[in-house]
Image (spheres, rainbow, N blue to C red):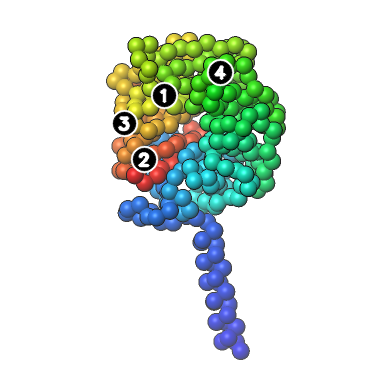
Amino acid sequence: MRILVIILSVCLFLVISGCKKDDQHTTNVAPHPTPNTFRIYKTNDGGLTWGNALDIEGSRFPLEISFSAPNTYFIITSDNQLFRSTNGGSVWQSIDLPANAGILTSVSSGGRTSFCSIVNTSGVIMLSKDNGDTWTEPESPVNTRLNSIHISPEPYTCGFIAGISGTVFATNDAGETWNQLPLTAQTELFDIDYFGCGSTIIASANNKVYLSNDYGASWSATNINPSSSGPDITSVSIDENGQDAVGLCSGGGIIYSHDLGQSWQTATPAPYTGNIVFHNLDNTSETIFAVGDAGTIWNSIDHGYSWHNIPNNSVYSLMDICFKDDSDGIIIAKPN
């Protein structure tokens, strides 16, 4: 009888251990891309070096990553899944979303505790205040594609959404309700960022950057390349001090502004970074990072004037970068 009990205990331990391993969706890094996985890279020295690679099971298409205090990251994928880590990126789990979650486009938690908000291509806005365990759907003024959402960190409660046909929404209650702002340009907006809860708002489009200095009541537009139709400005970011702004162009190229969006210049030489996303690191060193194809990581330490390549052994396409503080950050990557 004792032998039987021991055997059953061992079997039960193996089954439970196996279940836990599957639920974590984390594997050792394979030398080559494996089916249905994507990869993350971590830094603990402010982005000077990147390593600690992990393969995440369940999808090959990471899209965006966002940080939620004190130690949670969210990743959405272009095949409409949400992954969550509550221990700084060491272990990941897939999280169920509402049935009508649809095609996901952007995620933001803004460093807010237990908070996450997601938008999709059908105008749906999803909000969670318990780290993704349950979701509500605030009323959306439209049923069309929303491309970008950004929420302020606590204690602020503001945020903005950008989408097609010049769509801009604003919230002043941490995503509970959203109001449409009067940007009349009928163009697709790819990204949006802001300073001072909307005292300055910058939205990006094809060859144009739209600027508001009055909480979205009025807007002006700047052509990045007046002599041509120009590239799509796929991403914009404003320095937390409210002094500088930067943007990324499709096909490579970085633009920067030192008057908070009033005028723009092209970085010289403009590093070719392919399909990239761009983020400020912090508000003290003015360090800026850009990531892109074939493991490309660029950074600038002089407000975007010049750019330097950070050596990296990855051949993956780096999709997004997110820092939780001045030291620790994560890059998400998909196989080529």
Residue occupying image coordinates x 49% and y 50%:
90
SS of the residue at dot 2? strand
Q: Amino acid at mark 3?
A: Asn
Which callout, 1 or 2, points at the residue further toward the start of the chain?
A: 1
Q: Secondary structure at mark 3?
A: strand
Residue type, mark 1 in image = Asp
Q: Position of residue 333 (x, y in %)?
A: 41, 43
In primary-sequence order, the first of circles 2 and 3 is 3
Nearer to us in this view, 176 or 221: 221
Q: Earlier in the sequence, mark 1 or mark 4?
A: 4
Query: Depth-wise, is mark 1 or mark 2 nearer the camera?
Result: 1
State the quadrant of the N terminus: bottom right
Q: State which mark lies toward you, 1 or 4.
A: 1
Q: Say the numbered circle drawn on residue 201.
A: 4
Mark 2: which amino acid? Ser
Tell me the distance, in whole angstroms, between the alpha carbons under discs 4 and 2: 29 Å
Q: Which residue is mark 1?
A: 232
Q: Is disc 4 surrounded by few (<14), some (14 to 19) or many (20+) residues within 10 Å?
A: many
At x 49%, y 35%, the residue is 323
N-term mark: 4 or 2: 4
Residue of label 3 = 309
